[in-house]
Amino acid sequence: MKPIVVILNPKARSEKAHALIEQVTRLSKSVVLRLTEKAGEARQMAARAVEEGFEKIVAAGGDGTINEVVNGLAGSNAILGLLPLGTMNVFASELGVPANSLRKCWSIVEAGHVRSIDLGRANDCYFVQLAGIGLDAQVVQETSWELKKSIGPLSYLVNAAQIAARKPPQLIVERKGRTDTGSFVLIGNGRYYGGPFTIFKDARIDDGLLDVLIFKNLGYLDIVRYLQAIIFGKHTKLADVEYFQTPRVTVRSEEKVPVEVDGEVIGSVPVTFRLSSKKLRVIVPAPAS
């Protein structure tokens, strides 16, 4: 079997880092393991692996690690593989890659069933699953690694409650022929956001369209109402929620509002979202016969 580069972020489960490194190394003799030590290094490693001619490049970590690897191989003919080791693993869930067994995931990588999917762009940054402007990006920006490590996903809710007490920004959302306003905006390439909930109900990861949700309000009661509606799949029916599909959308504001893609803050508005002209090839489970 040809060598396969595995780019591993040990911080994804730092308390088990050494054991995790050993597990990945034992997966196969074809593994070429490269460990990241700082933010942005996974992108550099992926780009180098492309230059070196590796056919399969595997991201071992959470959605943030996957995003870095994707930005390193975007536009090339390299194929992305997944070893989902993060807290949420939203992109892996979207593709049906299990997050509970390294061995099962490696079997999928070795089988090499490839699917071509849309690759989103936020200005010059690529993303595969989702993006957000406003509340969720502020939560990502203000949630420390120490807090995530101590209380897990609850850390995001704690910070969301604090941010909701502030005056929300006014976001201007522009698409062809129409302008809307809102307090925060979510962009989806796939269906899932932040866990098992289908928040972008019409999304298909290869349909050539981005799904956009505009939430008009941002008080405590509004957030509770939105969350309840999302749990029951009713959020797109709310009067103060706008949902549409488009190949291109721009979000701007007179304020400095952060933007995140795949759970990583990349800067501030203005930002234009669109799809890359070249698809991303990713290894997925073979369809059931």
Image (tube, helix red, strand yellow):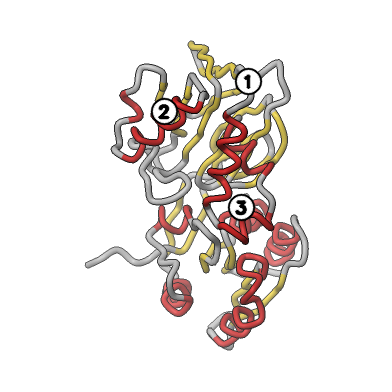
Q: Quadrant of residue 211?
A: top left
Name the residue carrying label 2.
Answer: 245
Image point 57% across, 29% down: which residue? Answer: 164
Q: Residue furthest left?
A: 289
Secondary structure, mark 2, is: strand
Question: Who comes first in sequence, dot 3 or dot 2?
Answer: 3
> Which residue type carries mark 3?
Asn
Which x, y percent locates residue 276? 57, 40
Which x, y percent locates residue 254? 71, 15
Q: Which mark is residue 167?
A: 1
| 166 is higher (above) or lower (below) than 84 | above
Q: Are marks 3 and 1 in contact (CB under 8 Å)?
A: no
In this rendering, which labeled residue sits more in front, label 3 or label 1? Answer: 1
Q: Quadrant of the C terminus?
A: bottom left
Image point 45% across, 80% down: which residue? Answer: 103
Classify residue 233 as left or right of residue 176: left
Question: Who comes first in sequence, dot 1 or dot 2?
Answer: 1
> Which residue type carries mark 1?
Lys
Secondary structure, mark 1, is: loop
